[in-house]
Amino acid sequence: MNEIVSVDGGSAKSAEELAGLKNITMVVYALQALSFLWGVTAIVGIVINYVKRDDVRGTLYESHFDWQIRSFWWGLVWGIVGFLLIWVLVGFFILFAAWVWMIYRVVKGWLKLNEGKPVMPA
């Protein structure tokens, strides 16, 4: 009775399972937001993403996990590029742009999650 059928024909998830997946997705967004103060929280978040990735497959939260994973890796790449180019001074602009971009990604994802919508394009 509490079964919710997956959109892509995958395994059905109960309302409780979906609520748990939503909470995990929200926790990862919070960890990404906290990474602006303590960078290690982003690493915890990406580990959670990869551990729980199979559980969210075929649900609304799959796009959020893809969004979070891409945000982490692209943020890391641009952070490293910016750090390496600090001595040329252009690195400060790259780091600032990467910082603003990450804020945008976390806020957009969190808002879409609260609306119950997927993040498109992931």
Image (cartoon, helix red, strand yellow):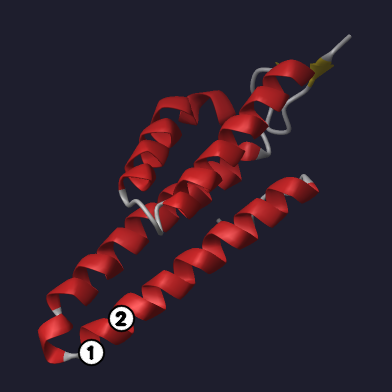
The label on residue 94 is 2
Q: Amino acid at mark 1?
A: Val
Q: Is residue 121 visible?
A: no
Query: Along the line of sight, which residue is nearer the eye, 86 or 52?
Result: 86
Q: Secondary structure at mark 1?
A: helix
Residue at 65%, 18% in the rendered image: 11
Q: Residue at x 55, y 58 (%)?
A: 106
User: Along the horizontal axis of the image, is 81 left or right of 105?
Assistant: left
Mark 2 element type: helix
Structural distance between the alpha carbons of marks 1 and 2: 6 Å
Q: Amino acid at mark 2?
A: Ile
Where does residue 97 sit, x and y in percent of width and height? 40, 79
Q: Which residue is mark 1?
A: 90
- Where in the figure is residue 75, as x and y percent of width and height? 35, 62
Where residue 88 sits in the image (x, y, percent)?
A: 13, 90
In the depicted view, which residue is nearer to us: 83 or 2?
83
